[in-house]
Amino acid sequence: MIGFTANQILLTFSKAERITVEGALVLMRASQAPVHMDSGNPAISLLECLDRQVVDISVDPQSNLQIGFSDEHCLLLLNDSMYESFHLHLGGKSFTF
């Protein structure tokens, strides 16, 4: 499920697994231009990720979180070292980046 509030994007994968995004993110589509957005201006393009299977999750050296989908789309959550950018909620534990 994907939800939007005034300052957050909510990505819910299951009852115990969700990501709350408060910073900038980029949706990279297979063979198309990247779509840049932030939580204050979420692009409707994010809805393209609905009903897609997550096939890969990784963190790059700058602590950006990359979520790869089955259709070769990739959602990149950008880490801003000065502010809270996103929160991972996994199995009852929370992690803030």
Image (cartoon, rainbow, N blue to C red):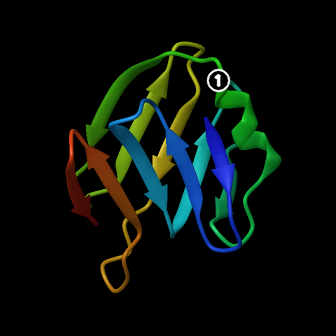
Q: Nearer the viewer, residue 72 or 84?
A: 84
Extreme residue toward the right, this view: 44
Q: Nearer the viewer, residue 1 or 72?
A: 1
Residue 68 vs 42, above or below: the answer is above
Label 1: element kind: loop
Residue 90 vs 77, above or below: the answer is above
Residue 47 vs 82, above or below: the answer is above
Asked whether, in this view, residue 83 is left or right of residue 63, the answer is right
Residue 13 in the image, given as x and y percentages of width and height = 46, 31
Q: Nearer the viewer, residue 22 or 68?
A: 22
Asked whether, in this view, residue 62 is left or right of residue 41, the answer is left
Q: Residue sitting at 74 percent across and 36 percent down? A: 47
Asked whether, in this view, residue 63 is left or right of residue 7, the answer is left
Circle 1 packing at 10 Å, graded few (<14), some (14-19), many (20+), is few
Can residue 83 be seen by looking at this rendering?
Answer: yes
Q: Residue sitting at 28 percent across and 66 percent down? A: 97
> According to the image, label 1 marks what residue?
30
Can residue 32 be seen by looking at this rendering?
Answer: no
Q: Residue sitting at 63 percent across and 41 percent down? A: 2
